[in-house]
Amino acid sequence: MNTTPAVQVRDLHKHYGAKRAVDGLDLTVEAGEVFAVLGPNGAGKTTTIEILEGYRDRDSGDVTVLGVDPRKADRAWRSRVGIVLQSADDQAELTVRELVRHVARFYPSPRDPDELVEAVGLTAKAGTRVRQLSGGQRRRLDVALGIVGRPELLFLDEPTTGFDPEARRSFWDLLRGLRDDGTTILLTTHYLDEAEQLADRVAVVRDGRVVALDAPRALGGRATHEALVRWHEAGEVREVRTPTPTALVADLVRRFAPGEVTALEVLRPTLEDVYLEMVGERTSRASTAQATTDTPAPADLEESVR
Ligand code: ATP
């Protein structure tokens, strides 16, 4: 098993004039994982990715990608790294199939172009000129070009922007297949469901540095956060915030038996809640909800109610 991290970044800095776009960023992406970078507009995600890809110079910091400093990257390194560039227009007169076949020739051991066109859902467009594709179709073609060389590490900067929901789901399946084949994937996204569905770990970047790093289900203490239990009783909505929702629900079940606890819900902060809290947009629903004060809990619930 390969235990060398695919990406290692220590104390990375990049300034544009007075603007500190990247300001002391640390990051380690293990080989074989899907790693998502989240952050608001201007947080420094693209700048960081482009430094890792070798397309942008850094001011300071240590960076290795597949064991190599991208500043010193050579052709052999490039063939191991998949980069999804923003759509280039210079090949717009080729058809989808022609372009994938053309790019495949640059790699020592490329994927089968026709199979790849099918895998990204473009078989029906294989004979269409690139300039005639829709935005979402063009993005899928970009991804096909990024993976045609069987990269060990794939960089994806906002890969599903402009996809319809069905295309996004089939693209996620494609990425899961790549991960199962051992490809390391580093992606940036503004879609929290995308990070939640795909990523083994998520880094939240704000003002050029990582402010949180964890598995999506645990980010910001989500998994252990107090839960909000809500139900309807006597024509009113009742809400109780508790660290032990199971005990509260068990008490409710006993009290309402053999009937239903009407409109019972157990809510924890969503990834969106904790993310928005971290980037300073708002406080989370379940963490700010107050237990209703005008509906005192029944005696048999008192131990569970805070
Ligand atoms: P988004 O989510 O909007 O793509 P991002 O997190 O990728 O944002 P970057 O594109 O890395 O952010 O930009 C970080 C900061 O650096 C922003 O304030 C941006 O305006 C600035 N910046 C980026 N590229 C340049 C440049 N070439 N010259 C000057 N400033 C730049």
Image (cartoon, rainbow, N blue to C red):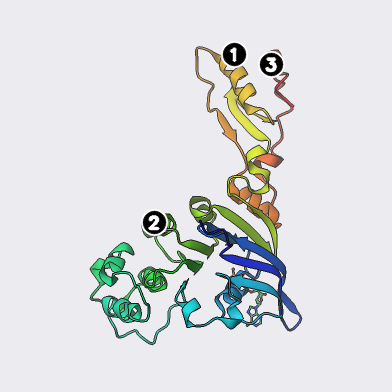
The answer to whether the residues at label 2 and label 1 have Cβ atoms under 8 Å apart is: no
Q: Which of marks 3 and 2 is nearer the N terminus?
A: 2
Q: Distance between the residues labelled 3 and 1?
A: 9 Å
Q: Does residue 45 appear in the picture of this structure?
A: yes
Percent position (x, y) of residue 81? 48, 72
Q: How far apart are marks 3 and 2 (CA)?
A: 52 Å
Eyeballing the image, is 125 above or below 288? below
Say few, some or many: other residues with alpha carbon within 10 Å of mark 1 (under 14 / 14 to 19 / 20 or more).
some
Specify whether 167 is left or right of 30: left
Number of marks drawn: 3
- Residue 111's image quarter? bottom left
- Residue underneath mark 2: 177
Question: Residue furthest toward the front?
Answer: 1
Percent position (x, y) of residue 45? 61, 69
Q: What residue type is labelled 3?
A: Pro
Helix, strand or loop at label 3? It is: loop
Which labelled disc corresponds to residue 298?
3
- Residue underneath mark 1: 255
Eyeballing the image, is 174 above or below 86? above
- Residue 110's image quarter? bottom left
Quadrant that contains the C terminus: top right
Q: Which of 272 and 109 is in front in this view?
A: 109
Say few, some or many: other residues with alpha carbon within 10 Å of mark 2 (under 14 / 14 to 19 / 20 or more).
few
